[in-house]
């Protein structure tokens, strides 16, 4: 199978396979593009792979498959897709920049920092820099502990695009490095602007949420929600969760589920309420409902939470199984690796002391659940 894929790739890039294709092949490509835009990443990936095999728009098809794999959390596969796209004969200049940006971001996800920076430098050498590329370069520099370079790149990014979203992205990058103060100034700068519409109020509420100013967060989010912004409703639930008010949070997550087309994040929020309240069977039910829709980072969060629930139920054998399944999908997750090591000791202990009472007061999941849950995950296509 691997050799067959290599042969198809070589044929495509050398022009042996006709680019014209039949109408059904082009239909696959158009459907893949439509699925990608609609965030149906599994379907998009399958359709792009069909287009690749048929030799339809090779660079675009490999790029599309790579983007779908990024959203699905398959970063190594995405890097292979992007590299294949770059190796194709006809790759337009703007498309090459786009592919290099995606590949750099994927390299960053797997902590291949030198490779990520090399792609960023290639973009800087051959193209005009924009806000997204400045931010990506700063993010890579920060990961490499090049703090001055990162600061310069982030300032350039915010200078090019002084939006709430960019401020949050920069803040989040600094937060990952325990440099919250460096990122907070961008949040403060964003709040200096005036809200003009519901989305602005929602974004301002998110900024206040990150700053732990929950009163102002709720005020802004309520204005956005009153104007029909469903994202604001989800964020309200998250704010209530931070305040340990699960009853109010539950109402907001239920409201979001009833309104949103993609309700996975709402069900995930309900599962968090259940976990906080100790209703683990209900948590598993809500996680099961969410898994019907979830992809990408949201899927990762849900699968982590599923393992956590089984651990809290003292079902260590099932928790261990879920941890192993999780690591098959996300092998680089250090937190889950620690969980699995812990669970192995519990399962071994239960096997050696069958029937003995076991407590879970010191489980690692107790302290890591919130950090590994994200009811607001999103990545730009």
Image (cartoon, helix red, strand yellow):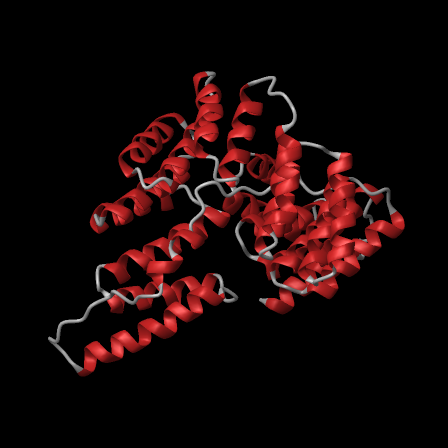
Q: Residue at x 63, y 64 (%)?
A: 111
Tell which of 125 and 272 is nearer to you: 272
Pick the front one: 329 or 246: 246
Q: Tell me where residue 197 appears, x and y as whole percent.
A: 57, 18
Task: Tell me, yes or no, if residue 355 can be seen here.
Answer: yes
For residue 53, side relative to residue 123 (left or right): left
Q: Is residue 202 left or right of residue 167?
A: left
Q: Quadrant of the C terminus?
A: top right
Give percent across and percent down for residue 85: 73, 53
Residue drawn at the location 58% of the way across and 36% of the way down: 31
Residue 186 screen position, x and y as percent: 66, 39
Instruction: List the single residue furthest toward the right.
Output: 125
Question: Residue sitting at 62 percent across and 32 percent down?
Answer: 164
Q: Does 317 appear above or below 207?
A: below
> Looking at the rendering, which quadrant does residue 273 occupy?
top left
Q: Give the vertical position of 194 relative to 320 (above or below).
A: above
Which residue is located at x 64 percent, y 32 percent? 190
The mark tally for this picture is 0
Quadrant into which the N terminus falls: bottom right
- Expressed as whole percent of the image width and height from the top left, the position of residue 179 reads 61, 54
**Residue that protrudes farthest toward the left in the picture:** 355
């Amino acid at each position: 199978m691997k050799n067959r894929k290599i042969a198809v790739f070589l044929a495509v890039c050398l022009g042996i396979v006709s680019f014209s294709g039949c109408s059904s092949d082009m239909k696959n490509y158009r459907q893949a593009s439509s699925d990608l835009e609609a965030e149906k990443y599994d379907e998009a990936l399958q359709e792009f792979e069909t287009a690749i095999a048929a030799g339809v728009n090779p660079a675009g098809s490999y790029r599309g498959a790579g983007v779908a794999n990024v959203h699905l959390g398959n970063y190594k596969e995405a890097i292979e897709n992007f590299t294949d796209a770059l190796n194709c004969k006809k790759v337009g200049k703007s498309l090459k920049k786009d592919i290099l940006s995606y590949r750099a971001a994927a390299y960053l996800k797997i902590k291949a920092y030198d490779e990520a920076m090399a792609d960023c430098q290639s973009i800087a050498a051959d193209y005009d820099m924009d806000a997204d590329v400045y931010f990506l370069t700063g993010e890579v520099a920060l990961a490499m502990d090049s703090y001055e370079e990162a600061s310069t790149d982030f300032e350039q990014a915010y200078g090019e695009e002084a939006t709430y979203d960019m401020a949050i992205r920069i803040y989040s990058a600094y937060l990952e490095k325990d440099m919250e103060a460096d990122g907070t100034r961008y949040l403060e700068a964003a709040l200096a602007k005036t809200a003009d519409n519901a989305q602005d109020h929602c974004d301002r509420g998110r900024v206040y949420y990150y700053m732990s100013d929950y009163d102002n967060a709720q005020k802004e989010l309520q204005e956005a929600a009153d104007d029909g912004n469903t994202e604001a409703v989800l964020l309200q639930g998250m704010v209530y969760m931070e305040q340990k008010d699960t009853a109010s949070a539950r109402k907001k997550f239920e409201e979001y589920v009833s309104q949103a087309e993609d309700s996975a994040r709402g069900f995930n929020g309900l599962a968090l309420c259940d976990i906080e309240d100790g209703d683990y069977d209900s948590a598993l039910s809500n996680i099961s409902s969410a898994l019907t829709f979830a992809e990408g980072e949201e899927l990762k969060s849900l699968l982590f939470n599923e393992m956590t629930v089984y651990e809290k139920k003292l079902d260590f054998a099932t928790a261990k199984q879920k941890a192993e399944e999780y690591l098959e999908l996300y092998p680089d997750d250090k937190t889950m690796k620690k969980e699995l090591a812990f669970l192995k000791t519990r399962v071994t202990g239960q096997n050696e002391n069958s029937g003995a009472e076991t407590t879970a007061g010191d489980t690692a999941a107790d302290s890591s659940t919130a950090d590994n849950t994200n009811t607001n995950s999103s990545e730009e296509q």
